[in-house]
Amino acid sequence: MLGPINMSLDTAKLTKLLADKCQLLTQLRQLGARQFQSIDTADLSQLLNLLAAKQRLIGGLQTIEQQLDPYREQSPDEREWASPADRHQCAQLAETCQQLLAEVVEIEKQSEHCLVLRRDEAATRLQAAHFASQARQAYDGPTGVALSQVDLSSE
């Protein structure tokens, strides 16, 4: 009789881990959307704060993933569930996690694309400023020519 009780506890733990994973992924999705806005508005201070917060969430996700590893080796059909409703709830949580992860990945791709565009725009502006500086120097001529060096005598 202890076997099914322990298996029920294991499936309850699995359900709790998936619920925690969903919560972290939801928070990551929200931070990802804010990150995209920060990149779009070039708010680097907020962007750095968001990246630090995201790093903490990713650390939490890694911990949960490690705790989920033993369940990956086991087929859902082999697990003892307290009820069919519990099994259904766990399956729903797993599906929700997959959807959230896909959304997080898509937001990250969009953010990366926007960040690359911002970087390229900044590089173009820096290059234009460099060319303008070179042009100005070419028109100004060599620097350091003193007035005392100008020959005003006539032959």
Image (tube, grey):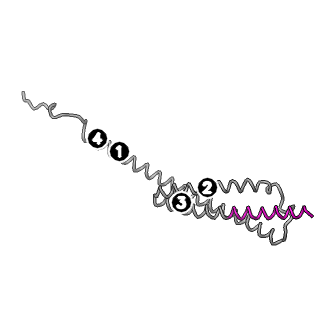
Q: Which of marks 3 and 1 is nearer the N terminus?
A: 3
Query: Are dots 2 and 1 in contact, CB under 8 Å?
Result: no
Indicate the amino acid at tag 4: Gln
Residue 37 among magenta residues? no
Distance between mark 3 and mark 2 Cα atoms: 15 Å
Tell me which segment is drawn in magenta.
1-22
Give percent across and percent down for residue 85.
81, 72
Query: Are dots 4 and 1 in contact, CB under 8 Å?
Result: no
**Disc 4 on helix, strand or loop?**
helix
Label 2, on which residue? Answer: 56
Q: Which residue is drawn at 35% across and 44% down?
A: 131
Q: Which of marks 3 and 2 is nearer the N terminus?
A: 3
Circle number at residue 131: 1
Viewer-proximal residue, 151 or 68?
A: 68
Viewer-proximal residue, 7 or 33?
A: 7
Q: Which of marks 4 and 2 is nearer the N terminus?
A: 2
Label 4, on which residue? Answer: 137
Identify the residue at the far left of this view: 155
Labels 4, 2: front one: 2
